[in-house]
Image (cartoon, coloured by chain):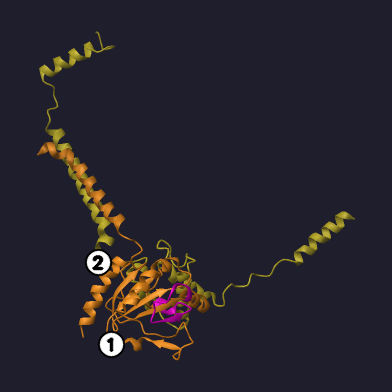
C-alpha cells in the first residue's frame, strides 16, 4: 500500500483534468434564467407589421395556449442561422411563434422577413429593448416556451437547432399541451 | 518692437483661457449613483466587465434603466432586485451568500485550511522521524564513512 503512494499526484492530476474537461464542455454564455417557472413579463407592444387590423399585441392574447417567444433582430447574425429551423418548425404548426423584434428598425425587420420568410404568427416591435430587459435577454437569438397559464417553462439562449427542438422543446410542448 | 509684440501676444493669450468645463450630465449627483450601482452589475454580453465599463448595447440600456429608476426614487436595493429578477444572481459582482453559493464564498478558505493542516501534519511527522532516528553513528558506520572519505578523489589523505 505504501508503494502506491507515488500514484497520488497522478490521480490528483487526472481528477483536475476531468474537472477542466467538464469545464470546457460548459457554455459560460448560458446563464440559467431566474425567469423559468415565473409568469411571463406583461407587455402591450406595437406589432412589427402595422398593416393589419390590430396595431398592438398583448401577452393576454396568448392565455390558454402554449406558445413560443423567439427574440430576433435583422442585425443578428446567428438569427439567420436559426431562421430555417424556425421556418420549418412553423410549418408543422405545433405552437404559435411570437416574434420579439429586438432593438431593430421596423423597415429592416420587415425586409428581413420578406427576404428569408416569416415563421412568426406575428412579431411585436421592441425598438428600445425594454421588453427584452424584462425577458432577461442578453444574447439574441433567445427562445422561450410559455405554458397555458402564461408561465415561462423553458429558455434557450442562442441558436435553436433541430436537435434541441426534437429532444427538448417538442417533448416539453407535448407535456404542456396535455396539462389543462 | 518684436519683443513688445511678443509680450503683448503673451499677455493677451491669458484672456483667452477657457471657462470651467461644463458638466457632461445634467445631474452629476444622480450620475454618480448610477455609476456606483452599475459597478455592482455584470454585463452579460461581455461577462468580465461591469455594465459601468461596458459599451455593449445592453449595458447602455441597463444604465439608462438604472438612471430612470433612480430618478423615479427607487432605492439601490430595489434596482438590484429588479436586475436579479431578470438576469439571476450572476449579474451581481458580489453574489449573495446562500446554499448554492457557499462553495463559491468559502471554498477557497476551506482549501487554504486543508493545505495548512496538511503542511503542519507533514512538518510534525518529519520532525518526529528526525527525533527518533539515532543521532550517534555506530562504530561500523564510522568505519565506513572513514573509508569513503579516504577513497574519494581529493579526500583527506591524512
Residue found at the very far bottom of the displayed protein: A53
Colour in which the image shows chain B? yellow
> Residue sitting at 23 percent across and 52 percent down?
B113
Q: Nearer the viewer, residue B68 or B114?
A: B68
Residue identified by numbered label 2? B100
> Residue sitting at 27 percent across and 72 percent down?
A169
- B31 sits to left or right of A43: right
Residue A59 position in % (x across, y down): 36, 86
Q: SS class of the residue under badge 2?
A: helix
Residue A26 position in % (x across, y down): 30, 59
Q: Nearer the viewer, residue B118 or A46?
A: A46
User: What's the magenta region?
Assistant: A114-133
Label 1: how many residues lie within 10 Å, few (<14), some (14-19) or many (20+)? few
Asked which quadrant contains residue A99, the reply is bottom left
Which chain: orange? Answer: A
Residue B36 position in % (x across, y down): 45, 70
Label 2: how many residues lie within 10 Å, few (<14), some (14-19) or many (20+)? few
Q: Numbered disc 2: what chain?
A: B
Q: Which mark is residue B80?
A: none
Q: Which mark is residue A64?
A: 1
Amino acid at each position: 500500500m505504501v508503494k502506491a503512494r507515488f500514484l497520488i499526484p497522478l490521480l490528483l492530476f487526472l481528477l483536475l483534468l476531468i474537472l477542466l474537461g467538464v469545464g470546457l464542455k460548459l457554455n459560460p454564455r448560458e446563464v440559467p434564467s431566474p425567469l423559468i417557472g415565473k409568469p411571463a413579463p406583461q407587455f402591450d407592444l406595437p406589432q412589427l407589421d402595422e398593416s393589419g387590423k390590430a396595431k398592438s399585441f398583448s401577452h393576454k392574447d396568448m392565455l390558454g395556449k402554449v406558445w413560443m417567444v423567439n427574440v430576433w433582430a435583422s442585425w443578428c447574425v446567428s438569427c439567420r442561422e436559426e431562421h430555417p429551423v424556425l421556418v420549418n418548425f412553423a410549418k408543422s404548426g405545433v405552437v404559435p411563434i411570437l416574434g420579439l423584434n429586438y432593438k431593430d428598425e421596423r423597415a429592416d425587420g420587415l425586409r428581413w422577413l420578406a427576404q428569408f420568410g416569416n415563421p412568426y404568427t406575428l412579431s411585436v416591435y421592441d425598438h428600445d429593448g425594454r421588453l427584452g430587459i424584462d425577458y432577461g435577454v442578453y444574447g439574441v437569438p433567445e427562445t422561450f416556451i410559455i405554458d397555458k397559464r402564461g408561465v415561462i417553462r423553458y429558455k434557450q439562449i442562442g441558436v435553436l437547432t433541430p436537435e434541441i427542438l426534437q429532444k427538448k422543446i417538442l417533448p416539453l410542448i407535448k407535456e404542456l399541451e396535455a396539462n389543462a | 518692437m518684436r519683443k513688445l509684440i511678443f509680450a503683448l501676444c503673451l499677455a493677451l493669450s491669458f484672456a483667452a483661457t477657457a471657462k470651467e468645463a461644463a458638466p457632461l450630465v445634467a445631474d452629476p449627483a444622480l450620475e454618480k449613483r448610477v455609476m456606483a450601482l452599475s459597478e455592482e452589475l455584470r454585463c452579460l454580453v461581455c461577462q468580465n466587465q461591469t455594465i459601468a465599463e461596458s459599451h455593449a448595447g445592453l449595458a447602455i440600456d441597463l444604465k439608462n434603466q438604472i438612471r430612470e429608476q433612480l430618478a423615479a426614487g427607487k432605492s439601490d436595493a430595489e434596482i438590484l432586485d429588479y436586475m436579479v429578477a431578470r438576469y439571476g444572481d450572476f449579474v451581481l459582482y458580489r453574489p449573495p451568500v446562500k446554499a448554492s453559493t457557499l462553495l463559491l464564498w468559502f471554498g477557497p478558505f476551506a482549501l487554504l485550511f486543508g493545505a495548512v493542516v496538511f503542511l503542519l501534519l507533514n512538518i510534525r511527522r518529519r520532525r518526529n522521524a528526525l527525533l527518533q532516528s539515532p543521532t550517534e553513528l555506530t562504530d561500523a558506520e564510522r568505519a565506513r564513512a572513514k573509508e569513503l572519505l579516504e577513497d574519494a578523489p581529493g579526500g583527506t589523505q591524512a
